[in-house]
Amino acid sequence: MKKRTKYTDEPLGRIRTIDDFLPSPSELAFREEQVKVTIGLSKTAVTFFKKQASRHHSHYQKMIRHLLDAYVAHHQRRSTG
């Protein structure tokens, strides 16, 4: 059994308010339009992403999609900057 926490009525000390930095629910729900494609990948690459996805409790296709999105974002910034 876990040890229970006993709360007391003690002063909390100096308290400060921080700005809200979390995205709004509408930003979290936003999904960019996706296009289905068929692509041939090397067995080595797919095996790598599947292992990484399993290790991080994710989906390998989502990881590949995020990698491609990061690549595009990086190169878009370089071409407009």
Image: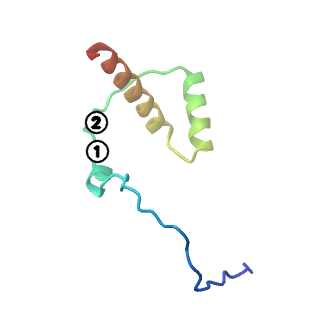
Q: Would you identify the image quadrant in which residue 68 lies? A: top left
| 49 versus 20 height, above or below | above
Q: Residue at x 57, y 36 (%)?
A: 50
Q: Residue at x 31, y 32 (%)?
A: 36
**Which is more toward the observer, 79 or 66?**
79
Q: How far from the left and from the top, in percent, is residue 75?
A: 35, 17
Residue pushed farthest top? 79
| 21 versus 65 height, above or below | below
72 left or right of 16 in image: left
Give the SS element for disc 1.
Answer: loop
Q: How far from the left and from the top, in percent, is residue 9?
A: 58, 86
16 left or right of 23 in image: right
Q: Residue at x 41, y 32 (%)?
A: 65
Q: How far from the left and from the top, in percent, is residue 29?
A: 30, 52
Say few, some or many: other residues with alpha carbon within 10 Å of mark 1 (under 14 / 14 to 19 / 20 or more): few
57 left or right of 64 in image: right
Q: How far from the left and from the top, in percent, is residue 57?
A: 56, 48
Q: Which mark is residue 34?
A: 2
Which amino acid, mark 2? Answer: Gln
| 67 versus 32 height, above or below | above
Say few, some or many: other residues with alpha carbon within 10 Å of mark 2 (under 14 / 14 to 19 / 20 or more): few
Residue pushed farthest front? 14
Which amino acid, mark 1? Answer: Arg
Q: Residue at x 41, y 57 (%)?
A: 18
Give the SS element for disc 2.
Answer: loop
Q: In which quadrant of the rendered image does the N terminus lie? A: bottom right
Q: Which mark is residue 15?
A: none
From the viewer's perspective, is the residue at label 2 or at label 1 nearer?
Answer: 1
Q: CA distance from mark 2 to mark 1?
A: 8 Å
Can you identify the residue that label 1 sits on?
31
**Which is more toward the observer, 31 or 11?**
11
